[in-house]
Amino acid sequence: MFISTIGVIVTNKRESTKSVVRFHHGRGSQEPIFGDAKNDAALDVIPTKRLIGNQLFTLCAMMAHNLSRELQMLASPVTERALPKRPAAWAFEKLDTLRHRLIQRAGRLTRPQGQLTLTLSANEAVRKDLLHFLDVLQKAA
C-alpha cells in the first residue's frame, strides 16, 4: 500500500512504488474517452419517458461514438505502448472536433450526369481529411 497526498493505492502488483504510481496515473488517459462519450455523444442524456426510446437513443449514441473511434484507429498509427504510464494506444480527437471539422459543413447534394454528388466549399484541409478517411475505409473493406 502506498499513501500520498492524492490518495491511497492498494494493489497486488509486485513492482516499485514509483512504477505502481505511474501505472495508476496512466489509467487516467482513459477518462477523457469516457468524458467525450458522455458529452459529445450525449451518453449522459435520457431524452424520453419511455424505456425503448432511451434504449434506442443510447444505442445510436454508442454506435456513433464507436464508429468515430474505429475510423480514427484505422486512420492513425498506434502510439508507443511501452511507456510507464501505459497511455491509450491511440491519440483520439474529440468527437466535437471531428463533427465541426468534417460533418457540420455547408454542402449541396446534386446529380450531375445522374450521379449523386456532395459538393462542399473549397477547403483543402477538409478535403485532405475526408479523402484520407475514405482511403482508409476502402483499404479496410
Image (tube, helix red, strand yellow):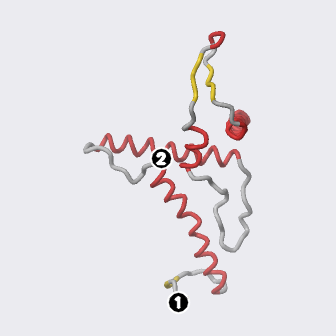
Residue 3 got which mark? Answer: 1
Sequence-wise first label, 1 or 2: 1
Residue in the foreground of this view, choosing between 40 and 30: 40
| Quadrant in the rendering for residue 119 | top right
Q: Residue at x 66, y 69 (%)?
A: 86
Q: Position of residue 118 (x, y in %)?
A: 61, 24
Residue 62 got which mark? Answer: 2
* Quadrant of the rendering where the C terminus is positioned: top right
Q: Residue at x 62, y 81 (%)?
A: 20
Residue in the foreground of this view, choosing between 61 and 52: 61
Q: Position of residue 105 (x, y in %)?
A: 57, 35
**Camera sees residue 104:** yes
**Camera sees residue 141:** no
Q: Is residue 15 above or below residue 70?
A: below
Type of amino acid at the residue the image marks with label 2: Met
Type of amino acid at the residue the image marks with label 1: Ile
